[in-house]
Image (cartoon, grey):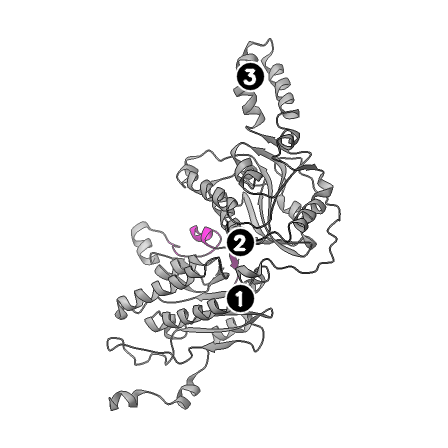
Amino acid sequence: METEVHKLKSASELRALREVSGHADSIIAELFDPGTFVETGVYVKRSSELVPTEGVSEFEGVITGYGAIGGRLVFAFIQDAERCRGAVTAAHADKICALYDLAAGSRAPVIGVFSSSGAIVLEGVDVLAGYGRIMQKSASLKGIVPQIAIVDGICSGLSATLCSMFDFVIANERDARLYIAPPAIMKAKFNVAEAGTANPQAPTVAAVDLFAPDTLGAADMARSLLAYLPSSRSDGTICGVTNDDPNRSTDVNVTSDDYDMRHVIAELADHGEFFELQADASPEILTGFITLNGRVTALVANQPAVGGGLLTAGAAHKAAKLVSFAASYNIPLLTLVDCGGFEFAPSSEFAPYTNQLANLAIAYSKGNNAKVTVTLGRSYGAPFTLLGSKALGADIAFALDTAKISIMPPEAAVEFVFDAEIKESDDPAVARAKLLAGWNNVLSSPVAAARSGAVDDIIVSDDLRRRTAAAFEMLAFKTGGNV
């Protein structure tokens, strides 16, 4: 026992060694308001007889603590590749779990910075159980406090799984490696040269919400994202003050089938600012946050400029993620619809398509947050129901006077309903054109949807911002929480 005691360094010796590594220190400095970060579990360090100690840091490969970001309390853990290569041990896991307990008690967000060479193999099942404990803590706070992951280096196996449990994932494009199977195995087995990269062109793109050019860019992006998020579910959405007139006219042109929805969003949002998420994944739909008359609002919008804004399996998955998050935190949700329909392709069916569409329907149906939907252009068939319809829980539904709402695309509907009549006419082309014009003027007019109550009002494009902002003001005190 005496020999063991002599191995321990004194408090003064440890204080002399206690320096946050340069890389981790730069992350902390970029993330937190100056001088506010306080480290927790500083001296936690345990080792077994099997794990070598010579040359190993006196501190665990993870830094945990809390501080202020934009004046609000935030908790964070930073895996430090300069301390034991950020290797995960049971003690490493205990530090993170203790941090989660503090976050749960304080109802404050958690940021996790992932950069680890993996688990200490010699710790065996203990380290696997450690991963499980962290996952349980993360899952228990899902929908209670926001969780943001920053992938700053290697994030593999169970770490990659934990990272993907967070609400939002930010990747350092230069250094991030997000994967389950090690790249060496993937390359040997499938000859995949760039397995595990986390750039916008890689397969991992769907798992990442935001890409940053480097470490400091990722930390700064996390700060920017937090500005749109409440500290906890009980806080509700963030409301600020804006000098952008909520009643100003909106200058939008949505008459073509391939316009850029970002132009509409820029006209609609306060000062034209749109914090976009997953920009490189399923670009046929746009998701992110805006402020509308100072109130943070989640936004889902079809993108006609990409593939006609079809509701693909990927688009449904992308939309459902944000819709679910908004419902959990009582953040108002605006849906802008101009959808050419479903995608008919084997790749979608294998997604599997129906599961993603079902999840989208569930996401819109849950929660009691304020929901406003505006149909700008096409809304044919099932996407009309799935994309924020009143039937799925929207409080207010508008349609522009140029919108086209129909049970089927007009061309397909005319062929289906009037096929015999067209074939028997003297001039099928003329008969088809006449029937199509009639269908467009009557059955795909927004008036038909408004008469049924599926649309509350038909508005002009100039009034898009004014009417949408007014609807959310009316709904401002709607009770939040899940039904």
User: What residue is pinned by disc 1?
Assistant: 219
User: What residue is pinned by disc 2?
Assistant: 481
| First in sequence: mark 1 vs mark 3 | 1
Say if 48 sits above or below 343 in the image. below
Amino acid type, mark 3: Phe
| 83 is within the stretch colored magenta | no
Residue depicted at 33% across the width and 54% down the height? 186
Q: Position of residue 336 (x, y in %)?
A: 61, 43
Disc 2, disc 1: CB below 8 Å? no
Gap in angstroms between the C-alphas marked 2 and 3: 48 Å
- Quadrant of the image containing the N terminus: bottom left
Q: Position of residue 193 (x, y in %)?
A: 37, 54
Gap in angstroms between the C-alphas marked 2 and 1: 30 Å
Disc 2, disc 3: CB below 8 Å? no
Res 21 visible: no
| First in sequence: mark 2 vs mark 3 | 3
* Mark 2 closeness class: few <14, some 14–19, many ≥20 residues within 10 Å: some
Disc marking residue 476: none
Residues drawn in magenta? 193-219
In the rendered structure, the answer to whether residue 220 lies left or right of residue 192 reads: right
The image quarter containing residue 137 is bottom left
Q: In the structure shown, which secondary structural element does the residue marked by tag 2 occupy?
A: loop
Q: Which of labels 2 and 1 is toward the front? A: 2
Q: Looking at the image, which is closer to me, 264 or 192? A: 264
User: What residue is pinned by disc 3?
Assistant: 418
| First in sequence: mark 2 vs mark 1 | 1
Q: Which of labels 2 and 3 is toward the front? A: 2
* Mark 3 closeness class: few <14, some 14–19, many ≥20 residues within 10 Å: some
Amino acid type, mark 2: Gly
| 200 is within the stretch colored magenta | yes
Q: Looking at the image, which is closer to me, 370 or 420? A: 370
In the rendered structure, the answer to whether residue 299 lies left or right of residue 200 reads: right
